[in-house]
Image: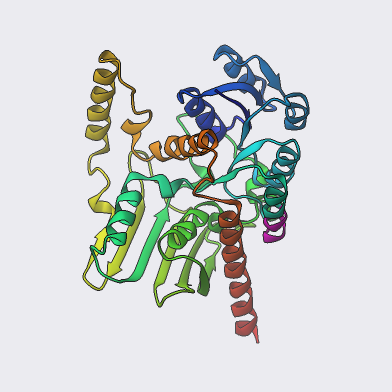
């Protein structure tokens, strides 16, 4: 049984917490958050060790096998470092850290510590993406030429029935590391690397439609360093998308055909949810394992990635997403920001 601590119980942290409770070989023994409401919820779900400071959790819970870190971006570096120094394996929500310099230090710390670290590149674990990856690897569309990936959503402006204020750190570049490019664009850039390997930025257009201190839309063109394959990334925070709609699309163009995520993702999410809910009901009756979050489709990827991390710890193997993957994604984002600044200077000149 893996003894696990959850650090950060915001939206994503609570999702990771609930997913951890559903994994057979995992026991959540400690949580940390500065919200008394969140800590009380954890207590009601059976967690006895509650902390308002993650440093205290790491200092006092020395027998942990792993921690799941889901804190505001600017706290990732410190928390990951402390966890590794405490001899604890780490799953950290993306980004690994907010600068490539910090990411590089973490990579070195992982190598020195001998512990496992996985970054939450959840879209690699989406069912549609996995099937498209298998199809490309089997040569179904021939040699890959162009990858189009887009995701336009609400960003931090999304809320439930009762609107809640957006935390200030989201709009402070020194704390967030950036806007939509580091939020949603991070995943799309990682997906391009997932299909084609190491890459470079050859075009960057970044916009500020809402006149915020951070960008709210961006279009990038990437190119593989190993082949002529190019990728177009289109990402934005400017669209009010209400679930079950999910404005995400991955299209792969090859020499012998193409693949679109639209052909793999359920066309009717409500019907899919009802069907998966019934399947889980029958599995439970028959004494079989249910498939957590399968009814939501898009959220199942978060369960899949966390399950993969814990399975790797059980089997003593490296997770499929490493600290180096987190570093290279941040390097490409910084490259995009730098290229945009260079283009602005040329226009002024």
In this view of the protein, can residue 240 be seen by the observer?
no
| Front one among 62 and 126 | 62
Tell me if residue 181 is in the magenta stretch.
Answer: no
* Quadrant in the rendering for residue 88: top right
| Front one among 15 and 238 | 15
For the record, the magenta segment spans 99-105
Residue 150 horizontal side relative to residue 295, left or right = right
At x 31%, y 31%, the residue is 295
Where does residue 186 sit, x and y in percent of width and height? 52, 56
Where does residue 302 sit, x and y in percent of width and height? 45, 38
* Quadrant in the rendering for residue 182: bottom right
- Residue 143, above or below 166: below
| Front one among 343 and 278 | 278
Tell me if residue 103 is in the magenta stretch.
Answer: yes
Residue 132 horizontal side relative to residue 216, left or right = left
At x 63%, y 47%, the residue is 170
In this view of the protein, can residue 292 be seen by the observer?
yes
| Front one among 81 and 39 | 81
At x 46%, y 65%, the residue is 197
- Residue 90, above or below 106: above
Where does the N terminus fall, quadrant-wise?
A: top right
Main SS category, magenta section: helix
Residue 196 horizontal side relative to residue 75, left or right = left
- Residue 14, above or below 186: above
Where does the C terminus fall, quadrant-wise?
A: bottom right
- Pick out the residue farthest to the bottom: 349
Where does residue 318 sit, x and y in percent of width and height? 54, 46
At x 63%, y 30%, the residue is 65
Where does residue 176 sit, x and y in percent of width and height? 65, 50
* Quadrant in the rendering for residue 257: bottom left
């Amino acid at each position: 049984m893996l003894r696990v601590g959850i650090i950060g119980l915001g939206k994503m942290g609570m999702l990771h917490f609930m997913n951890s409770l559903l994994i057979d070989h995992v026991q959540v023994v400690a949580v940390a958050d500065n919200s008394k409401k969140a800590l009380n919820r954890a207590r009601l779900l059976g967690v006895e060790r509650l902390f308002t400071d993650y440093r205290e959790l790491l200092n006092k819970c020395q027998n942990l096998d792993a921690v799941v870190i889901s804190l505001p971006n600017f706290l990732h570096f410190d928390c990951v470092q402390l966890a590794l120094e405490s001899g604890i394996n780490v799953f950290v929500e993306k980004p690994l850290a907010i600068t490539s310099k910090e990411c590089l230090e973490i990579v070195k710390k992982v190598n020195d510590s001998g512990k496992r670290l996985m970054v939450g590149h959840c879209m690699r674990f989406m069912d549609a993406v996995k099937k498209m990856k298998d199809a490309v690897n089997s040569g179904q569309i021939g040699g890959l030429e162009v990858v189009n990936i887009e995701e336009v959503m609400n960003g931090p402006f999304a809320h439930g029935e009762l609107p809640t204020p957006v935390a200030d750190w989201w709009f402070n570049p020194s704390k967030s590391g950036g806007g939509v490019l580091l939020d949603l664009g991070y995943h799309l850039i990682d997906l391009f690397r997932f299909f084609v390997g190491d890459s470079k930025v050859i075009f960057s257009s970044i916009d500020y439609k809402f006149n915020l201190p951070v960008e709210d839309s961006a279009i990038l063109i990437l190119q593989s360093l190993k082949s002529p394959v190019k990728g177009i990334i289109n990402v934005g925070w400017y669209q009010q998308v209400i679930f079950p709609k999910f404005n995400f699309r991955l299209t792969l163009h090859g020499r012998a055909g193409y693949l679109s995520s639209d052909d793999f993702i359920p066309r009717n999410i409500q019907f899919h949810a009802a069907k998966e809910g019934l399947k889980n009901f029958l599995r439970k009756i028959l004494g079989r394992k249910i498939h957590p979050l399968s009814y939501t489709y898009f959220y199942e990827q978060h369960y899949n990635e966390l399950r993969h991390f814990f399975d790797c710890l059980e089997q003593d193997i490296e997770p499929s997403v490493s600290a180096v993957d987190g570093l290279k994604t941040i390097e490409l984002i910084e490259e995009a920001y730098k290229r945009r600044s260079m283009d602005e200077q040329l226009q002024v000149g």
